Image (cartoon, helix red, strand yellow):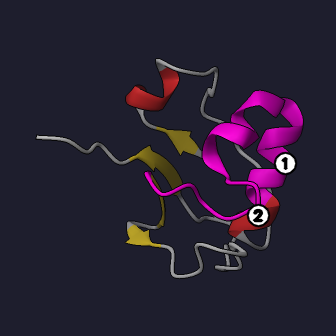
C-alpha cells in the first residue's frame, strides 16, 4: 500500500505490504500499525472521507462505504488525498 506525498506531510504513513482479500482488510492492517492514520482516511461511518481516493491496480475503487473491492496477491493499492480549491 502506497500513500501519496501530500498525505505524508500530515501523518506518518510509510509504504507497506499487507496480505488482504479486500481494501477494507488491507486498511485495517495498516491502521493497526498506524492508528492515527485511520481517522485521517475514514469518516465516522468507516467509509472514505470525501477528499480521499483509493486505487487498486490504477482503478478507482467502486465501494467507498464498506471498501469491499477485492484485492489479489499482486494488487497495488494507492491512497491519495484529493486536492481541491482554485
The answer to whether residue 76 is seen in the rendering is yes
Q: Is residue 46 magenta?
A: yes
The answer to whether residue 34 is seen in the rendering is no
Q: Secondary structure at mark 1?
A: helix
| Position in image of residue 69 (x %, y %) | 64, 79
Mark 2 highlights which residue?
45
Q: Secondary structure at mark 2?
A: loop
Does label 1 or label 2 sit earlier along the sequence?
A: 1
- Residue 67, by quadrant, is bottom right
Among all residues in the image, which is located at the extreme right? Answer: 32
| Position in image of residue 37 (x %, y %) | 70, 34
Q: CA distance from mark 1 to mark 2?
A: 18 Å
Report the quarter where the C terminus lies: top left
Left/right of residue 50 with respect to residue 72 in the rendered view: left
Report the residue at 82% width, 63% height from top.
25
On residue 82, the disc is none
**Which residues are drawn in magenta?**
26-51
Report the residue at 76% width, 64% height from top.
45
Among all residues in the image, which is located at the extreme left? Answer: 86
For label 2, the crowd category at 10 Å Cα-Cα, with few meaning under 14, some 14 to 19 and many 20 or more, is few
| Position in image of residue 76 (x %, y %) | 53, 58
Mark in front: 1 vs 2: 2
63 versus 73 height, above or below: below
Mark 1 highlights which residue?
29
Q: Is residue 23 magenta?
A: no
Left/right of residue 12 with respect to residue 57 in the rendered view: right
Left/right of residue 76 with respect to residue 22 in the rendered view: left
Amino acid at each position: 500500500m502506497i500513500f501519496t506525498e501530500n498525505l505524508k506531510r500530515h501523518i506518518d504513513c510509510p509504504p507497506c505490504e499487507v496480505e488482504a482479500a479486500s481494501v477494507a482488510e488491507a486498511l485495517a492492517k495498516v491502521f493497526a500499525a498506524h492508528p492515527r492514520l485511520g481517522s485521517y482516511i475514514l469518516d465516522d461511518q468507516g467509509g472514505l472521507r470525501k477528499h480521499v481516493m483509493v486505487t487498486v491496480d490504477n482503478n478507482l475503487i467502486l465501494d467507498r462505504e464498506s471498501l469491499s473491492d477485492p484485492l489479489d496477491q499482486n494488487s497495488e493499492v494507492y491512497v491519495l488525498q484529493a486536492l481541491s480549491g482554485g
